[in-house]
Image: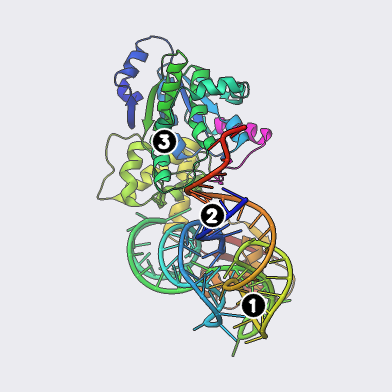
RNA sequence: GCAGGGGUUCCCGAGUGGCCAAAGGGGGCGGGCUGUAAACCCGCUGGCUCAGCCUUCGGAGGUUCGAAUCCUCCCCCCUGCACCA
């Protein structure tokens, strides 16, 4: 395994020559990566550093996934990150288990160690915390980009937030990391790990950051934003979402997700995207599922036909059916939403748009009703 | 503790007594177009028994024919100052 493969898509590999030196040790390296257990789904974005971990594993090294259970349980009291909920122990355990299971579509679980940072953080007493805080200065922490920005903007920064990078850094001490992986957003935290390891008399870890995957909305892909493709997500969803990325993101996705050495064919973005979508589904669910998802996409999205499998539902009693109520029931809409859909021509019965709110029973019985682009139901009764 | 600023519909953010279910943007949804869920154009975007009615603008009261807008009390957030035990 070449260094080039280990560092594919890397933005920073620090310090220079550090990785070569670690590899020269001739023993399996411990390659650390932190995971966010507040969001249980592993996304294609998580997949980018995980793919690096997988490369290290193929070269005989050990992946170490750190579950920030302690950090999560304490929560972020600043109120700034309200998006980060405080979870119970059971939820964290379940999410961690789920993360590892999902990540196994990419990494090798047999060569992966999963550690919970409560294991060591819970044991730190105050004196030890003070020792940890001496490893780094306020100026160093405030150098970090988002802190610097917030300071300039006179936005609040709580002391506990300043401590977060230190906790993560201490994880590296505890597991004796040789390498730590992360997105470019993690650069500062990973470097803090080096400082702290050194303060604890350890050989500092090598820091390896990879490019951040940009999603269809132009923002970084993250579970909390909801702009993600999950590695365990339904094949049709994965396929469709992949087709949803803007054409000009294709080359990044080819590079980061496919790990392709070639650019996608610029003259045929559709074909390029289909290739990408197929590949993503194949990695998660296999080639058969990918073929089926592509068929589904062709049929439903490109040709605008009903899918092969349409869920069935019973019509309510009565000779005259009130459509808004029926749609609201079937597709979990408010009746106002259902009315809007109808008035906008988004509701079709056997392919024909409807504009009446009440329909005789026999117009609906046995018919396929479509609400919007992708919601279908067939009524019986 | 003191002074000042602020809490608005999914998000950001206008709105200082009626023309406000509340500008604008984002997101989402729908339609058109396109053999992409891309791009582009148009529309919609609180709820309901929907030409009308009901509930929203941190919370509770109050003034008024009428309040997101004014008053009172309360809760929460931010900034500065003070306290430096």
In the rendered structure, the residue with mark 2 lies on which chain? A
Nearer to us in this view, A301 or A23: A23
Residue in the image at 38% along x and 9% along y: A26
Location of residue B58 in the rendering, given as x and y in whole percent from the top left corner: 63, 62
Q: Quadrant of the N terminus of chain A?
A: top left
Q: Secondary structure at mark 1?
A: strand
Q: Nearer the viewer, mark 1 or mark 3?
A: 3
Question: Which label sits on residue A142?
Answer: 3
Q: What is the span of residues highlighted in magenta in the rendered image? A: A76-101
Say if mark 1 contacts mark 2, CB within 8 Å.
no
User: Is residue A148 depicted above or below B39 in this figure?
Assistant: above
Q: CA distance from mark 2 to mark 3?
A: 57 Å
Q: Position of residue A244 (x, y in %)?
A: 41, 52
Circle 1 residue? A358
The secondary structure type at the circle numbered 3 is helix
Residue under disc 2 on the same chain as residue under disc 3: yes
Foreground label between 1 and 2? 1
As drawn, the label of residue A308 is 2
């Amino acid at each position: 395994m070449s260094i080039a493969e280990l560092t594919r898509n890397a933005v920073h590999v620090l310090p220079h020559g550090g990785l070569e030196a670690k590899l020269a040790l001739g023993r399996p390296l411990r390659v650390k990566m932190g995971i966010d257990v507040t969001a249980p789904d592993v996304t294609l974005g998580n997949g980018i550093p995980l793919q690096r971990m997988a490369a290290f594993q193929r070269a005989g090294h050990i992946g170490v996934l750190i579950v920030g259970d302690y950090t999560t349980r304490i929560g972020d009291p600043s109120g700034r990150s309200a998006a980060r909920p405080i979870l119970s122990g059971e939820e964290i355990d379940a999410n961690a288990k789920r993360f590892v299971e999902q990540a196994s579509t990419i990494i090798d679980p047999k060569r992966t160690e999963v550690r919970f940072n409560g294991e060591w953080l819970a044991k730190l007493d105050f004196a030890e915390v003070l020792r940890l805080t001496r490893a780094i200065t306020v100026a160093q922490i405030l150098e970090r980009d988002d802190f610097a920005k917030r300071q300039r903007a006179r936005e609040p920064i709580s002391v506990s937030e300043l401590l977060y990078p230190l906790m993560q850094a201490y994880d590296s001490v505890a597991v004796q990391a040789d390498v730590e992986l992360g997105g470019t957003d993690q650069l500062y935290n990973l470097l803090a790990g080096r400082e702290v390891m050194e303060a604890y008399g350890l050989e500092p870890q090598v820091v390896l950051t990879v490019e951040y995957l940009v999603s269809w909305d132009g923002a970084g892909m993250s579970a909390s934003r909801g702009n993600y493709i999950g590695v365990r997500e339904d094949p049709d969803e994965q396929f469709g979402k992949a087709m949803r990325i803007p054409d000009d993101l294709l080359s990044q996705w080819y590079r980061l997700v496919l790990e392709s050495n070639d650019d996608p064919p610029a003259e045929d973005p559709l074909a390029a995207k289909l290739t990408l979508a197929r590949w993503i589904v194949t990695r998660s669910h296999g080639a058969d599922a990918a073929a089926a998802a592509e068929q589904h996409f062709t049929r439903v999205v490109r040709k605008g036909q009903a899918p092969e499998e349409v869920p069935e539902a019973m019509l309510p009693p009565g000779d005259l059916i009130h459509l808004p109520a029926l749609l609201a029931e079937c597709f979990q809409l408010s009746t106002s939403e259902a009315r809007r859909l109808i008035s906008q021509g988004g509701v079709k019965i056997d392919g024909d748009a409807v504009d009446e709110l009440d329909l005789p029973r026999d117009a609906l019985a046995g018919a396929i009703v479509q609400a919007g682009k992708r919601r279908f139901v067939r009524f019986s009764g």
